[in-house]
Amino acid sequence: MAEPAEVRRPLTLEAYLEEEARSPVRHELVRGFPRAMAGASRRHNLLVVALVAALFPRAREKGCRVHAETLKLKVAPDTVYYPDLMVVCGPPGENPFLEERPCLVLEVLSPSTEAQDRWEKMRAYLSLESLQAYLLLDPERKGLEGYFREGKGFSLKRYAGGQVPLPCLDMSLDLEAIYSALD
């Protein structure tokens, strides 16, 4: 006779944060349910480090914070992600383990997470009132897709190289310089 299936109930944000603080493995919270995260490749990590190096001086100058990979972003009462990189220019919230109002979010695509980044996370990130741009970098094609706020919506722009505007930092990102980290 088969064992009965375990019934899991959605976690509250507070319960998730408590479990995550004790867990040796990072989890995102998606509609109340924890989802373990995969490790990153060397190429992925090199791109994130290059992005932090490029954005940090300007962010600091403007009074903004740059967070990479290990700080949570609350996108809904029951959904929390770990973006590869986010920039937050407003005052920090009460919880020191998460942010809620980024102006810029970047994700580096990988085969195991690309669908989530392009669909699930995109919809969640674009729902944030504070967000001005959501950027997807592809380490294999060395390109970038960006969703940029225009009025009440977002427009999609693709870049194969050159300068990418970063509205909340009033600067441009040099794609060739970022991708040179992979050479």
Image: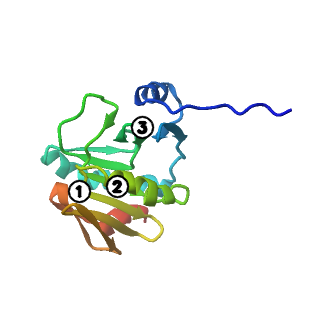
Q: Secondary structure at mark 3?
A: loop
Real-space CA distance between mark 2 and mark 3, rounded to the nearest whole angstrom: 21 Å
The secondary element bearing badge 2 is classed as: strand
- Which of the two labelled residues, at mark 3 and mark 1, occupies the earlier sequence position? 3
Say which residue appears at 41% left-offset and 43% top-offset: 82
Q: Amino acid at mark 1?
A: Gln
Circle 1 is placed at which residue position? 132
Residue 14 at x, y = what percent? 41, 26
Q: Amino acid at mark 3?
A: Asp
Quadrant location, the C terminus: bottom left
Query: Horizontal and vertical percent for residue 170?
Result: 15, 59
Name which quarter of the figure residue 69 lies in. Answer: top left
| Residue 107, x across and y down, in percent | 39, 55
Q: Residues within 10 Å of mark 2 (few under 14, many from 20)?
A: many
Q: Is residue 166 above or below residue 98?
A: below
Residue at 45% x, 54% y: name it. Answer: 120
Kindly state the secondary structure of the residue where label 1 is placed. Answer: loop
Q: Which residue is mark 3?
A: 78
Tell me the residue at 27%/53% (across/down). 104
Relative to 1, is 45 above or below?
below
Residue, disc 2? 106
